[in-house]
């Protein structure tokens, strides 16, 4: 076992454990919501009422921007492909592959849970959205990007910026009444968990790439 392989052994286990726990928690939250029927949690209705009373055109406009950036052709194609191209330009092809894989796994997981639980969205939704309120695909995507960026660039400020991005996206989804608050929690859990699980598969080539050690040829 090489020095690099020994160095990534612990992170791989951590990624697998943490990622699995987060994904399971997202599934369990979804099941809890599903088992309650169409009745939202008290915190869901309270938060929905709060943001409805706190209406401001600037905040609404910002939320609509995040609605555009976080999904659709922009969130599904432009952001992942643009991020991958940027990483390739930085001579990080394995990081680009990891980023694309994490985005794909996260998006697939969102659709699986949406169709498994089929939660109804808030009645006062202000944007067009796809089927299923749980989990929030926008927030899952934001969490995947945040965690993947932190894995690729392990810096405190990267993690802080990523966390802020996730919180802003979660706020915008509830501000537009596109999701209940618990939908955003489930999305964050799923997106972060997916990014960590995929990171476990890419840990060794990412470590070699980050240190300039060439990957072994088969």
Image (cartoon, grey):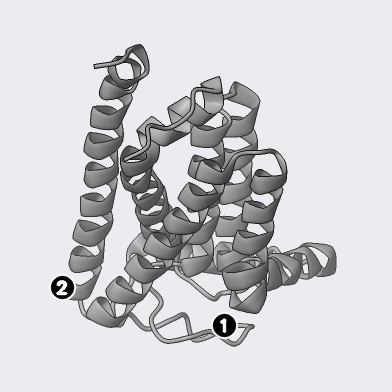
Q: Residue at x 29, y 82 (%)?
A: 115
Q: In which quarter of the image is the N terminus?
A: top left
Hey, which residue is sitting farthest front in the picture? 218
- Residue for point 21% across, 80% down: 37
Which residue is farthest left?
A: 35
Label 1 neighbour load within 10 Å: few <14, some 14-19, many 20+: some
The first of marks 2 and 1 along the sequence is: 2
> Which sits in the foreground, 126 or 118?
118
Q: Is residue 142 shown left or right of residue 5?
A: right
From the viewer's perspective, tell me whether residue 188 is left or right of residue 166. left
Q: Which mark is residue 35?
A: 2
Q: In which quarter of the image is the C terminus?
A: top left
Image position, residue 9 (x, y; %): 26, 23
Question: For residue 121, which quarter of the picture?
Answer: bottom left
Q: Of helix, strand and loop, which one carries label 1? A: loop
Q: Is residue 84 above or below residue 19?
A: below
Residue closer to the observer: 150 or 8: 8
- In front here: 112 or 187? 112
Residue underneath mark 1: 125
Q: Residue 10's quadrant in the figure?
A: top left
Estimate the x, y position of residue 148 in percent, counting from the top left: 50, 43
Going 83% across and 70% down the picture, which residue do you hit?
Answer: 57
Q: Residue at x 33, y 23 (%)?
A: 8
Marker disc for residue 159: none
Q: Is residue 34 left or right of residue 167?
A: left
In front here: 217 or 191? Answer: 217
Circle 2 residues within 10 Å: few <14, some 14–19, many ≥20: few
Whether residue 143 is visible here, answered yes or no, is no
Q: Quadrant of residue 62?
A: bottom right
Instruction: Residue lying at the far right in this picture: please name it.
Output: 58
């Amino acid at each position: 076992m090489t020095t690099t392989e020994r160095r990534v052994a612990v992170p791989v286990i951590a990624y697998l454990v943490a990622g699995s726990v987060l994904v399971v928690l997202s599934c369990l939250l979804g099941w809890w919501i599903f088992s309650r029927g169409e009745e939202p949690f008290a915190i869901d209705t309270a938060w929905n009422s709060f943001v409805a009373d706190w209406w401001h055109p600037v905040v609404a406009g910002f939320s609509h921007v995040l609605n555009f950036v976080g999904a659709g052709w922009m969130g599904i194609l432009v952001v992942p492909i643009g991020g991958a191209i940027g990483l390739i330009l930085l001579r990080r092809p394995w990081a680009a592959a990891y980023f694309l894989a994490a985005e794909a796994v996260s998006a697939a997981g969102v659709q699986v849970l949406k169709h498994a639980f089929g939660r109804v969205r808030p009645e006062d939704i202000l944007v067009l959205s796809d089927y299923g309120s749980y989990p929030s695909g926008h927030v899952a995507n934001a969490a995947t990007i945040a965690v993947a960026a932190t894995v690729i660039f392990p810096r405190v400020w990267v993690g802080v910026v990523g966390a802020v991005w996730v919180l802003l996206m979660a706020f915008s989804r509830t501000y537009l009444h596109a999701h209940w608050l618990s939908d955003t929690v489930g999305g964050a859990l799923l997106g972060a968990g997916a990014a960590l699980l995929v990171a476990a598969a890419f840990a060794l080539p990412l470590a070699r790439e980050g240190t300039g050690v060439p990957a072994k040829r088969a």
